[in-house]
Image (cartoon, rainbow, N blue to C red):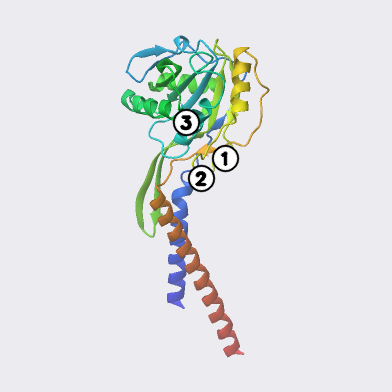
């Protein structure tokens, strides 16, 4: 019986330990506090992909799509930018002429060189020959990032996730938990709409797809400075991700731990019943 109890405890540690790594990834309060009708601070200065300082006021001169992401993300951020690039290639409005896009990293450690690599990739993904100043990829310091994200109601949390298996600890992932959203700005910086990503279709060629009708209508409203009513929508959070192999490993380990726990519990109940019958 002592051996059974020890195996039972080990199975609990194994199962709970794997789960702990993912429970630790739950952010305290990332999300969006909608501030439609209010204004983004266009006096803030960031650095462009060529490491030149740029004030937001020099960019936001037309209806603008603001995307807050971080450039080392291997989870939802690339899918959002890829989905937006695909939408840009399919709407009638022309980037640079009718509207602009700004992607700003909220990771103060991201550098302009990484922003430049991102820009090359996503401009190419649009399938259009759009001017370089139509879609900016910017980096910034902690203070400017803080002022911008607070002004638009974008809350995020830095994560360092560790997963425990048995009595050993293993680092899994580093990154941010944050909301997945496009923020539309009028030419004067007025926040006119939040367009949320509600779900990601993993395993498809386009995991995140934006409606060209929604994008067009949002840009047209921004051009007029018309703010959409505040909404309560399902919100997809971007969590620091595991690689495919890591995800399979932890899923398999958790499954084995759970199965072991069930088998031990069933065997324990069987022994208890057998013991009672013998006593009778």
Residue 241 spot, x, y in % from top left: 43, 43
**Contact check, label 3 and label 2, Cβ < 8 Å:** no
Crowding at mark 2 (Cα within 10 Å: few <14, some 14-19, many 20+): few
**Contact check, label 1 and label 3, Cβ < 8 Å:** no
Is 250 above or below relative to 209?
below
Crowding at mark 3 (Cα within 10 Å: few <14, some 14-19, many 20+): many
**N-terminal-most mark, 3 or 2:** 3
Q: Which quadrant is home to the C terminus?
A: bottom right
Image point (51%, 72%), residue name? 263
Please give left or right for residue 39 compared with residue 43 in the image: right
**Contact check, label 1 and label 2, Cβ < 8 Å:** no
Is 197 above or below relative to 275?
above
Crowding at mark 1 (Cα within 10 Å: few <14, some 14-19, many 20+): some
Could you give the CA–CA distance between mark 1 and mark 3, rounded to whole angstroms?
Answer: 14 Å
Q: Can you tell which quarter of the image residue 56 is in?
A: top left
Disc 1 target residue: 199
Q: Can you tell which quarter of the image residue 183 is in?
A: top right
Could you give the CA–CA distance between mark 1 and mark 2, rounded to whole angstroms?
Answer: 9 Å
Disc 3 target residue: 81
One can see residue 199 in this view: yes
Mark seen at residue 202: 2
Image point (47%, 53%), residue name? 19
Residue 185 spot, x, y in % from top left: 56, 17
Q: What element carries label 3?
A: helix
């Amino acid at each position: 019986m002592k051996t059974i109890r020890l195996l039972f405890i080990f199975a609990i540690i194994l199962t709970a330990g794997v789960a702990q790594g993912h429970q630790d990834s739950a952010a305290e309060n990332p999300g969006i506090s909608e501030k439609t009708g209010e204004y983004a601070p266009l006096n803030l200065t960031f650095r462009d992909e060529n490491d030149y300082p740029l004030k937001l006021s020099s960019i936001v001169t037309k209806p603008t799509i603001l995307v807050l992401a971080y450039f080392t993300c291997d989870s939802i951020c690339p899918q959002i930018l890829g989905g937006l690039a695909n939408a840009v290639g399919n709407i009638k409005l022309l980037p640079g002429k009718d509207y602009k896009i700004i992607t700003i990293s909220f990771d103060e450690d991201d550098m302009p060189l990484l922003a430049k690599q991102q820009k090359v990739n996503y401009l190419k993904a649009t399938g259009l020959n759009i001017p370089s100043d139509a879609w900016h990829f910017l980096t910034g310091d902690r203070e400017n990032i803080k002022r911008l994200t607070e002004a638009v109601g974008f809350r995020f949390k830095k994560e360092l996730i560790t997963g425990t298996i048995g009595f050993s600890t293993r680092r899994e992932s580093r990154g941010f938990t944050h909301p997945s959203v496009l923020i539309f700005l009028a030419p004067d910086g007025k926040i006119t709409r939040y367009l949320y990503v509600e779900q990601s279709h993993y395993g498809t060629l386009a995991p995140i797809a934006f409606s060209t009708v929604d994008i067009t209508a949002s840009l047209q409203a921004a051009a007029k400075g018309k703010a959409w009513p505040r909404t309560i929508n399902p919100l997809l959070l971007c969590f620091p991700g595991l690689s495919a192999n890591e995800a399979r490993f932890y899923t398999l380990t958790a499954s084995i731990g759970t199965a072991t726990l069930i088998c031990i519990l069933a065997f324990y109940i069987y022994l208890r019943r057998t013991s009672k019958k013998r006593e009778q």
